[in-house]
Amino acid sequence: MSVPDEVIRVLLLEDHTTFRQALSLTLGREPGLQVVAQAGTLAEARQALGVPIDVAVTDLDLPDGDGADFIRDLRRVQPRAQALVLTASAGRRDLARAVAAGAAGVFHKSAPLADVVAAVRRLCAGELLVPPNELVTLLREAGEEQTRDREIRTSLARLTARERQVLELLAQGLGDKEIAARLGVGIETIKTHTANLFGKLGVESRMQALILAVRYGVVRLD
């Protein structure tokens, strides 16, 4: 597809087809903007990296991965391309994660489409969507989040085989007495294992332990 240099070339990465098509239609009607690629999954978006892109408008939560990973890929392959995140959960953590990956801004999906269009134009004009002082704060928060992530992974790796068994049985909804019977040990032993894994993970409840274990793929909730 041949596109004049003055046209802003946009890639859309959004798994909700109706929303993506509506956004594509809106952008396509704007003078000087052209949607050159659309994708509903991370895999599809990566296949489009060979197409010259000025701005990628992407969601973060995708069926096969994280939009932040695509932003990193895009910035590596096309360093001049900009990324704008459209998400339904634009919390502080999402914003920091996206900015750390290379996003130039984050909008909630409820934002007026006119604001999104304006943001695309501003990015191509070299304008900042996030004030420098806010950017520094977000990058610091992202760094802290990455440090916390490494600490959690290290803590999970330190769990003994028995502690992992206890965690898996907790995920099945079993209580101390049931876990003890399943493993053929006393209740006090189970309480000791539970206290040990709580200490290693830095949590104070079963719910907190399970949230971490599920988030990092240690156990599954069926």
Image: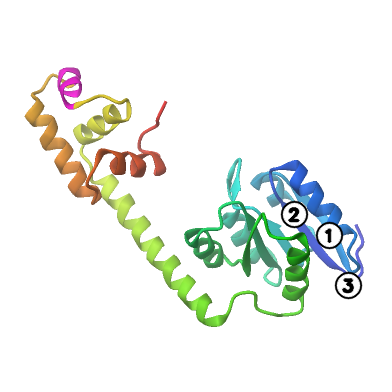
* Label located before the other in sequence (1 or 3): 3
Task: Please provide the residue range marked out in magenta.
Answer: 176-182
> Please, what is the three-letter code of the amino acid marked with disc 1?
Leu
> Please, what is the three-letter code of the amino acid marked with disc 3?
Asp
Q: Position of residue 40 (x, y in %)?
A: 71, 44
Residue marked by disc 3: 5
> Please, what is the three-letter code of the amino acid marked with disc 2?
Leu
Q: Which element is circle 2 on?
A: strand
- Number of marks present in the image shown: 3
Residue marked by disc 2: 12
Q: Position of residue 80 (x, y in %)?
A: 70, 72
Q: Are marks 3 and 2 in contact (CB under 8 Å)?
A: no
Vertically, is 161 above or below 156? above
- Tell me the distance, in whole angstroms, between the alpha carbons under discs 3 and 2: 19 Å
Give the mark toward the camera: 1 or 3.
1
Give the mark toward the camera: 1 or 2.
1
- Tell me the distance, in whole angstroms, between the alpha carbons under discs 1 and 2: 10 Å
**Label 2: few (<14), some (14–19) or many (≥20) C-alpha neighbours in 10 Å:** many
